[in-house]
Amino acid sequence: MKFFAKSITKVAGSVLLLCAGAAVASAQGDEDPAVPPADAFTPIERYGITYDKPRDIAEFYLQRFGLHRNDADTYEVKHPTDRSMRIMIVTADGLADDSVQAVQWRLGVKFSEGQWQAVEAGMRRKCARGENAGQWTKEVCP
């Protein structure tokens, strides 16, 4: 019986620790795990252009690469601390460049005076070759 009682005590303690850990984790971060942090991207030009819709900003950055909205997947979430902002992750793969598997932009867009504007912009690449092939990097692909 002593063994059983000790086991129950250990299990109950583990359950309490797990529950407490889950509560702390949910209180610490509201960030979406599908949204990589800004420091995972190389900062790029934000431009001073305003648009009617956030996705028009994504289209602008895609066009700079000769791409269109249909060439990319766009994921949009609310900014974790600023209600007037959205974070967009725009991913284009299957590029004509044989050294780059994919390009991804992280765009922080802010709504002000009836228009959207990029206030944060970054880009990273997934290289097709080299020591980091298949992994996202801020570096230029070899």
Image: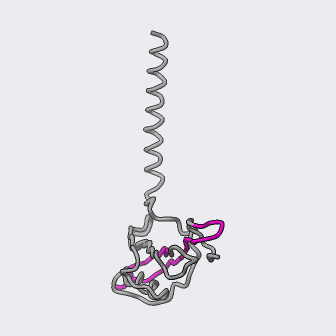
In magenta segment, residue 120:
yes
Q: Tell me which residue sits at (47%, 31%) in the image.
A: 14
Q: Nearer the viewer, residue 43 or 109?
A: 43
Report x, y in % for residue 45: 55, 85
- Which residues are the magenta region? 104-133
Q: State the image quarter where residue 71 is shown.
A: bottom left
Indicate whether 20 appears above or below 55.
above
Indicate whether 94 appears above or below 40.
below
Marker count (numbered) = 0
Q: State the image quarter where residue 57 is shown.
A: bottom left
Relative to 26, is 44 on the left or the right? right
Q: Tell me which residue sits at (48%, 11%) in the image.
A: 2
Report x, y in % for residue 131: 66, 66
Relative to 132, is 13 on the left or the right? left
Q: Tell me which residue sits at (50%, 77%) in the image.
A: 120
Report x, y in % for residue 104: 49, 74
Relative to 107, is 45 on the left or the right? right
Q: Tell me which residue sits at (34%, 82%) in the image.
A: 53
Indicate whether 22 appears above or below 69.
above
Report x, y in % for residue 64: 48, 88
Q: Nearer the viewer, residue 12 or 73?
A: 73
Q: State the image quarter where residue 69 is shown.
A: bottom left
Q: Nearer the viewer, residue 74 or 44?
A: 74
